[in-house]
Image (cartoon, rainbow, N blue to C red):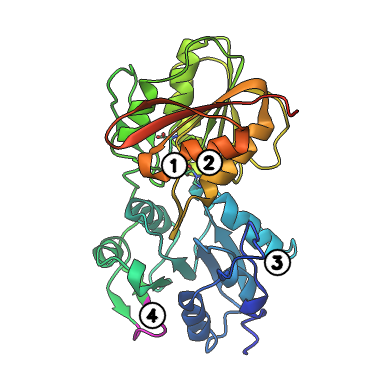
Amino acid sequence: MSDTLGIMLTTLKRYPDNPKSNLQAWDSADELILSYLAAFDLSEKRILVINDAFGALSCALTQGERTTYTDSYVSHRALVLNSKGERGSINNLDQLSGIYDLVLIKLPKNLSFLEDILCRLSQHLQAGSKLVCGAMLKHLSPAVFPLLQKYIGETSTSLAEKKARLVFAEFQREPVESPYPLEVAIEGFAHPFTNHSNLFSREKLDAGTKFLLAHLPEGSFSRILDLGCGNGILGIAAKRRSPEAQIVFSDESQLALLSAQANYAKYFSDSPELVWTNGFEDQPRETLDLVLCNPPFHQETTIGDFIAWQMFVDARRALKTGGVLRVIGNSHLGYHLKLKRIFGKSKIIASNERFMIVEAVKTALK
Ligand SMILES: C[S@@+](CC[C@H](N)C(=O)[O-])C[C@H]1O[C@@H](n2cnc3c(N)ncnc32)[C@H](O)[C@@H]1O
């Protein structure tokens, strides 16, 4: 291994670490990027690493002045843990600074997010700055190439190896402003929603969210969590019904929290609490009266109900006795059964051909 690279990838762990899972914390796209870089002297370079899932690239590089940008709390925590606290990340594209010579991008699935990144990046590149992007073939969308050509310059690719490929580009364009965030009007809400690029359903109201908005719980609640808040629409709607409530927004995406914060400020003069975390882990117990949640069913490219499960367990812990969790999900996900296991009981509040809204109330343990 060259002295550019300072870590055995096999020592890296995912976050959260599940000893029973055999999912790796790196992939062949990371390996391809690192073996490509091993031939270069990077000691004088300013290097930016973007979207490094569990820190494989950031931990492996030992040369140059290195910065990591991630929107994701899970990626940030993984990087801190895998680097034993030696590396951290910036989490807002406003924190990009100066000119970068080399940018390594693990291509995100969300192409709006990629476009936002490339536009913001264009203000921190100069002629000759180099991008090395990596992706697994199954996640490499052809739409990546026109985006790179539009905002960065001509592209070329490596040969595919171990089901991964690199895409190279050198900066040849002018700096541009990003078209994000979007301003999206939603029926029943006086102000358009500010939707940042890495947001779920950023161009229109999600059908599941719409269904849950039509079935919010009656009554007044003092402390309400919008869990996995996205643009904050559920928390804002809940606050309209409980004007005295303290609203807490939590999400693992910083861009979601930025959106929720901006949108909340259009309606209310108090400040919501913003919690950047995985699920609702490590939060105080027994403080919430109501939790609203439209859980995700994937984390970047990993699909499953593990995040929803964690969210429900975390929500139970953070609810006061008598507190209510109301969730929406595709009917086939069987959230009523999961909530029954976690809370002892659950109730289907409404359903249609696609979705089911389920409620669980926290009771004192016998
Ligand atoms: C289906 S979206 C719902 C967004 C919003 N509540 C709505 O209904 O429009 C799920 C949200 O969960 C967030 N999320 C994904 N993984 C998460 C995790 N591990 N911990 C916390 N939030 C997560 C996503 O960023 C996204 O905003």
Mark found first going from the N terminus, 2 or 4: 4
Instruction: Check contact, mark 2 vs mark 3: CB within 8 A.
Output: no
Q: Amino acid at mark 3?
A: Ser
Q: Is residue 306 left or right of residue 20?
A: left
Nearer the camera: disc 2 or disc 4: 2
Q: Is residue 100 above or below residue 321?
A: below
Mark found first going from the N terminus, 4 or 1: 4
Q: Which residues are magenta?
A: 158-166
Q: Position of residue 72 (x, y in %)?
A: 54, 51
Instruction: Check contact, mark 1 vs mark 2: CB within 8 A.
Output: yes
Q: Position of residue 280 (x, y in %)?
A: 62, 39
Q: Is residue 24 above or below residue 213?
A: below
| Numbered circle sitting on residue 117 | none
Give me the residue at 37% from left, 44% from top: 332
Distance (Cα) linking label 4 and label 1: 34 Å
Circle 1: element type: loop
Q: Amino acid at mark 1?
A: Gly
**Residue on which disc 3 sits:** 83
**Residue on which disc 2 sits:** 338
Circle 3: element type: loop
Tell me if residue 151 is in the magenta stretch: no
Instruction: Check contact, mark 4 vs mark 1: CB within 8 A.
Output: no
Distance (Cα) linking label 1 and label 3: 38 Å
Give me the residue at 30% from left, 37% from top: 354
Distance (Cα) linking label 2 and label 4: 36 Å
Q: Amino acid at mark 4?
A: Lys
Circle 2: element type: helix
Nearer the camera: disc 3 or disc 4: 4
Nearer the camera: disc 1 or disc 3: 1
Tell me if residue 159 is in the magenta stretch: yes
Distance (Cα) linking label 3 and label 4: 27 Å
**Rendered-image quadrant of the N terminus:** bottom right
